[in-house]
Image: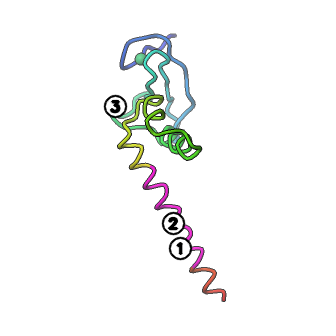
């Protein structure tokens, strides 16, 4: 049973793992896009967001990552900002805990 690409109709589609909710993620090798079966059309699965953020943090230029995953650079920057803010908040929490101990 061949799955066809939702965007370009190609059958060069591979399974790319599953979302937390257990929905199948597909990746099209022809147009390099991802989507989730029965998923919302315009949203990116959390798993892809994670991979994108990690790839950028590993030092790959946002422009390249944007092309590779077909995610707009502005979206990637938004994700990065959230990721970094999340880490800062974690650090703050840790510092507060340490101060309480002292
Ligand atoms: Zn495609």
Residue 88 marker = 2
Please identify the quarter of the rendering in which residue 98 is found: bottom right
Q: Does residue 89 appear to the left or right of 98 in the view shown? A: left
Mark 1 or mark 3: which comes first in sequence? 3
Separation (CA) of disc 2 from disc 1? 6 Å
Observer-nearest of 84 and 40: 84
Q: Main secondary structure of the magenta part?
A: helix
**Which mark is on residue 53?**
none
In the rendered view, would you say 95 is above or below 33? below
Tell me which numbered mark, 3 or 2, is placed earlier along the sequence: 3
- Mark 1 vs mark 3, foreground winner is 1
Q: Position of residue 45 (x, y in %)?
A: 45, 38
Q: Is residue 2 magenta?
A: no
- At numbered mark 2, what does the secondary structure look like: helix, strand or loop? helix
- Ligand 1 found in image quarter: top left
Q: Quadrant of the C terminus?
A: bottom right
68 shown above or below 47: above
81 in magenta: yes
């Amino acid at each position: 049973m061949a799955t066809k690409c939702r965007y370009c109709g190609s059958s060069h589609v591979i399974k790319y793992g599953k979302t937390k909710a257990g929905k199948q993620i597909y990746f099209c090798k022809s147009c390099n896009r991802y989507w989730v079966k029965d998923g919302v059309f315009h949203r990116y699965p959390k798993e892809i967001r994670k991979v994108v953020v990690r790839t950028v943090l590993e030092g790959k230029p946002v422009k390249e990552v944007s092309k590779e995953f077909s995610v707009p650079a502005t979206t990637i920057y938004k994700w990065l900002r959230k990721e970094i803010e999340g880490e800062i908040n974690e650090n703050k929490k840790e510092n507060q805990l340490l101060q309480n101990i002292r």
